[in-house]
Image (cartoon, rainbow, N blue to C red):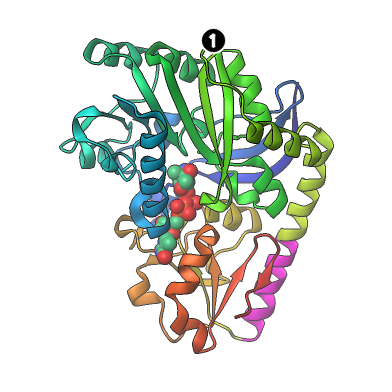
Amino acid sequence: MKKIFLNLGRQPIANSFLSSISRNSIKSEYFYNLNISFDTKTFLVSIKKPVNPKIQYTDKYAHRASESKTMQKAFRSSAIKLQKKFNPKYIMEIGSNDGVFLKNFLKKSVIAVEPCKNLAEITKNKFRTYPNFWNKKLSKKILKEYPKIDLIFSANTISHIPNLKETFEAILNVISNKGVLVIEDPSLSSVIKTNSYDQFYDEHVYVFSALAIKNIVKKYNLRLFDAEKISTHGGSLRYFICKNNSTYKNTNRLNKILSDEKKIGLNNFKTFVQFAKRVKTSKRKLVSLLKKLKKNNKKIISYGATYKSTTVFNYCKIDTKYFHYVTDTTFNKQGKFTPGTHIPIISPEIGFNDSVDYAFLGAWNFKKEILNKEKNFIDRGGKFITHVPKVKILRK
Ligand code: JHZ
């Protein structure tokens, strides 16, 4: 049974940055209700009513995975590790974005699947790219051109696909007998521990736990045999999944992760009810801090036009009343406006200057990288604000 524990209100598509704030474009903004539920049987946490993927993954998709040095390094090191561990002949990535992971492999053994045409365009000359949604139809098409695949990788994508049955059945079609499916996604335990409710937005249909993944893949003749904690996106899990009858043995570190998840109650609805209370407190504290700073005539901006910020801004009703603008390094977000709250987005070269007193860390998951990069801002007395794990002004 699915039980709702969190209501994050009316939300726009996190990635629908507006080109203008004319009356017409504001009128045509799409909103949906962001309610999060817990399935008492499988322990799966999901958006109660997901948005249609065709509205989300368009030829204007804004996120570029290689925008951060941290992610470039993380994907490179994953690629090297996986190559060494499984020595795969063919590798396929579901949701290959701008190719930041696949570029680390030999061109001829690589298959990319990316439904956003603008992203597929970037990689199509580098390796075989299918500009399609992942489903059984595509899996059959791929099988006509390639043998079965030894390593299927998917980072920050499986959690985005509403139809898990179709997803895993399609994977089962193409995976070789000794093949491994490696999935990376933000982990539910990190979200609960760090109160990062902004990991919930339209694209994150699911925030997985190992407990839930174990139960879900079992339904499709697959088996979770290993899992590993990784630091990306504020705390993620990397899951290793094989065919049910494959020879891979379940690892001790998987058992440890599963038992830790039980200890913090990821199999218990009560945990999520308590989390929802902490989310309300976080909202109250953030708004009150911003109000206080504004009263003292401070200039506040937001750093990183993340999808996560869309949830925070719309849930907390934060707009140009508080933030002058948002800075972001991604070229195709610059000159646009944040979804729902219509705050202008500009490049950090223009906006991150001496006039800024406070910067809200929209990209809090890159805190280390950003604090390192912005030493001058901090040295001259500029301050960062975060809401993860608690609302606070960061001290040096
Ligand atoms: P970032 C995206 O979420 C969307 P977002 C997606 N749904 C997903 O699952 C996760 O990623 C993985 C900018 N930036 O990656 C670049 C700076 O301006 O945390 C990005 O626009 N300066 C696929 O959007 C944004 O911040 C910097 O120094 O919540 C970061 O977005 C750095 C480091 C980043 O995820």
Which is the main secondary structure of the residues drawn in magenta? helix
Q: Is residue 106 above or below residue 355?
A: above
Q: Position of residue 305 (x, y in %)?
A: 45, 59
Q: Position of residue 188 (x, y in %)?
A: 65, 41
At x 46%, y 66%, the residue is 369
Magenta region: which residues? 283-296
User: Quick check: can you spot residue 1?
Assistant: yes
> Residue 209, can we see it?
no
Residue at x 58% of width, y 24% of height: 224
Specify whether tag 1 is near ligand 1 (CB below 8 Å): no
> Is 322 above or below relative to 65?
below
Horizontally, residue 295 falls left or right of residue 375, namely: right
Q: In the rendered structure, which amino acid carries the disc numbered 1?
A: Asn
Where does label 1 land, which residue? 245
Q: Up-down: is 190 above or below 82?
A: below
Q: Position of residue 321 (x, y in %)?
A: 57, 71
Q: Quarter of the image for the N terminus: give it.
A: top right
Quadrant assignment, res 21 = bottom left
Quarter holding residue 60? top left
Q: Position of residue 248 (x, y in %)?
A: 53, 20
